[in-house]
Amino acid sequence: MVAVGCLYIKSKEASAHDILKDLVEMCKGVQHPTRGLFLRSYLCQRSRSVLPDTSSGNTQNLHDALDFLLSNFVEMNKLWVRMQNQVRGITQKRAAPTQSPIPAAHRVQQGVCYAARLSSSST
């Protein structure tokens, strides 16, 4: 659905804001935190090319893009916290130390990087 949504945005048959909002809402349907985190990361990667920038001249589009990135980032953080709580519960049961899943943390950080790039282009 993410790939189809991004292609639909490129076709300009519908509002990018509405499609991106729907994609974020659809991602909430994934219950497993690890899968949801990677799905949201994939959404950020695929939608990066269709997000509006300052060259469009429309500040509302820029605000919509930042809203999309921030809402996706908030949801990624929720999944990250849920994942960490599950790891802590397993660690307490086994009494063995575990390492933090670095690749998952990198996925969460990518959302901030995309938002920073987008907002830096607006200055």
Image (spheres, rainbow, N blue to C red):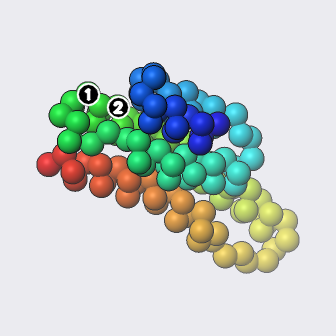
Which residue type carries mark 2? Asp
Q: Going 54% across and 42% down the picture, which residue do you hit?
A: 75
Q: Going 70% across and 34% down the picture, which residue do you hit?
A: 29
Q: What quarter of the picture does the N terminus occupy?
A: top right
**Numbered tag placed on residue 64 in the rendering:** 2
Q: Position of residue 48 (x, y in %)?
A: 42, 48
The residue lying toward the viewer, choosing from 11 and 16, is 11
User: Regarding mark 1 in the picture, which secondary structure is present there?
Assistant: helix
Q: Position of residue 87 (x, y in %)?
A: 73, 62
Is residue 28 visible in the rendered image? The answer is: no
In the displayed structure, 4 sits above or below 90; it is above
Number of residues whose C-alpha sits closer than 10 Å to that of mark 2, classed few (under 14), some (14–19) or many (20 or more): some
The alpha-carbon separation of the residues under discs 2 and 1 comes to: 6 Å
User: Regarding mark 2 in the picture, which secondary structure is present there?
Assistant: helix
Q: Which residue is mark 1?
A: 60
Q: Going 52% across and 65% down the picture, which residue do you hit?
A: 106
